[in-house]
Image (spheres, rainbow, N blue to C red):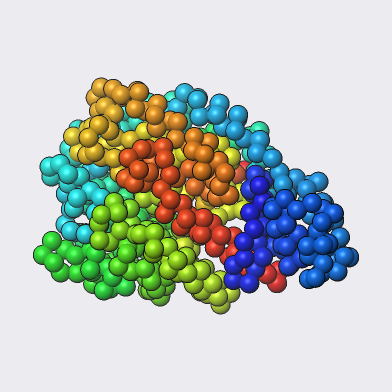
Amino acid sequence: MVHLFKNNGYNMVLDVNSSSVHVVDDVVYDVLDERNKGTRREDLEKKLGGKYTGEEILEALEECGELEKQGMLFTEDLYRDAVGQYQNRQTVVKALCLHIAHDCNLACRYCFAGEGEYHGRRALMSYETGKQALDFLVKNSGNRHNLEVDFFGGEPTMNWEVVKELVRYGRSIEKKYNKNFRFTLTTNGILLNDEMMEFCNREMGNVVLSLDGRKEVNDFMRPQRGGQGSYDRIVPKYQKFADSRNQEKYYVRGTFTHYNLDFAKDVLHMADLGFKQISIEPVVAPPTEDYAIREEDLPTIMEQYDILAAEMVKREKEGRGFNFFHFMIDLTGGPCVYKRLSGCGSGTEYLAVTPWGDLYPCHQFVGIDGFCLGNVNDGILRPDLCAEFKKCGVYSRKECSECFARFFCSGGCAANSYNFTGQINDVYQIGCAMQKKRVECALMIKAALADGE
Amino acid sequence: MKHIKTLNSRNLQNTLKKGGCGECQTSCQSACKTSCTVGNQTCEQAKAE
């Protein structure tokens, strides 16, 4: 499968199965386009003769033939069987999302956690429950050395002492069990202070700092409980925090909704604030919500991604570049094909833990009836449900197995699918359209930055 | 080549032989929490080399 697209003046070719990326001129682009349409070699001159000379078409064919010989064009999908076997392997738990507080000091309009409470009661995780969760992780992680624990909420800084105690406990058992904990924190910044920053800089491999962009956009969707905005209170702290981490191993992360479809401005606003690691992602919401992304919003969103990508190229060339999470692609390294095709691991390798120790497939399923998998004391009590999640992956969905972007999203998000279709193993079409666009933009950026090399 | 510039020389098919150790980061722990993005993740083995 060969995917062709034009973006920002570049003719791009992605050979899907080898993940080779080529920038080509018009004649090669048109020749490959005809080939994708099934045009026979001997008919090419008839089809394209008005635009190119016979010699040009022949040259294009020769160069394409050379790439085919080298395994970089029209390669086969060799992965289905191997990935199937990989997916059937005995999995271990390697990551937990600890809901350290089901409570929040903001009242974000789009919160999937219902302002922190996950449609349940307000609660803080006790140290004892957190400790049991870490023990559960160690016990169920097999030979896996690196274990990830994200302190999530609600707002985890509302239960800060427990966060610190759990980090201490985790560190105290690393050696004994030959494990390496990678702790991360996701916060809204309201309570963030110097002591927390220092602690995070010592102990947290990554911190995610929530901010939606421009002040009016952020404050409309992310008000405090009394209705006041949150922007002025958090931005100076975030700037200080990002600098103290040498502008790496963090993200300022926002959400865009139907109300700020011009979200490229929000990304650039955050870049103008000095942030170098930025992520802004589409809201996940049922179509009944007024702020939900609708199908008719897609053309605007596509245009925004194009505007953002072109501006990022410009800034990078001017020496003031920044990273945008969804445009980051490692073409020379990056994950192996197993990782790329076997899904996100929710419900198998990755679990969420509620303040009272219940296990869920991921943070987005917490509080949804029928998705509790067990608890940190008794372990997994619903292996049938885990098995359903284990099946999620690229080849379990027909649309994914035919999609050019399948090596970049691993089949999408089970929670998105569930929110929109009622099934965990279906396809969320609007999300797919955006994902494909982001892959194209990311590849164009690579081409533009390689230009002139 | 006159008409084609190739941006990467790595062939994903080669990772069939060596890959699958599972030590890499869980996708959702990185930044997203609302989507699924793997193309930008790092391979632990490549990091160690």
Which residue, as the protein is rendered here, is positioned at the far right?
A55
Quarter of the image that includes the C terminus of chain A? bottom right
Left or right position of A170 against A405: left
Pinpoint residue A253: horizontal percent, then vertical percent.
36, 60
Q: Nearer the viewer, residue A54 or A64?
A: A54
| Total marks placed | 0
Pinpoint residue A255: horizontal percent, then vertical percent.
33, 60
Pinpoint residue B26: horizontal percent, then vertical percent.
43, 42
Left or right position of A116 against B25: left
Quadrant of residue A246 within the rendered picture: bottom left
Answer yes or no: is residue B25 visible.
Answer: no
Question: At x 25% / y 50%, what residue is drawn?
Answer: A112
Question: At x 16% / y 63%, what residue is drawn?
Answer: A224
Answer yes or no: is residue A422 visible.
Answer: yes
Q: Nearer the viewer, residue A140 or A69?
A: A69
Quadrant of residue A313 within the rendered picture: bottom right
Question: At x 55% / y 41%, what residue is drawn?
Answer: A401
Up the image or down, A378 lies above or below A451; here it is above
Pinpoint residue A40: horizontal percent, then vertical percent.
79, 51
Question: At x 32% / y 64%, what residue is drawn?
Answer: A258
Up the image or down, A89 lies above or below A208; here it is above
Q: Nearer the viewer, residue A265 or A406?
A: A406
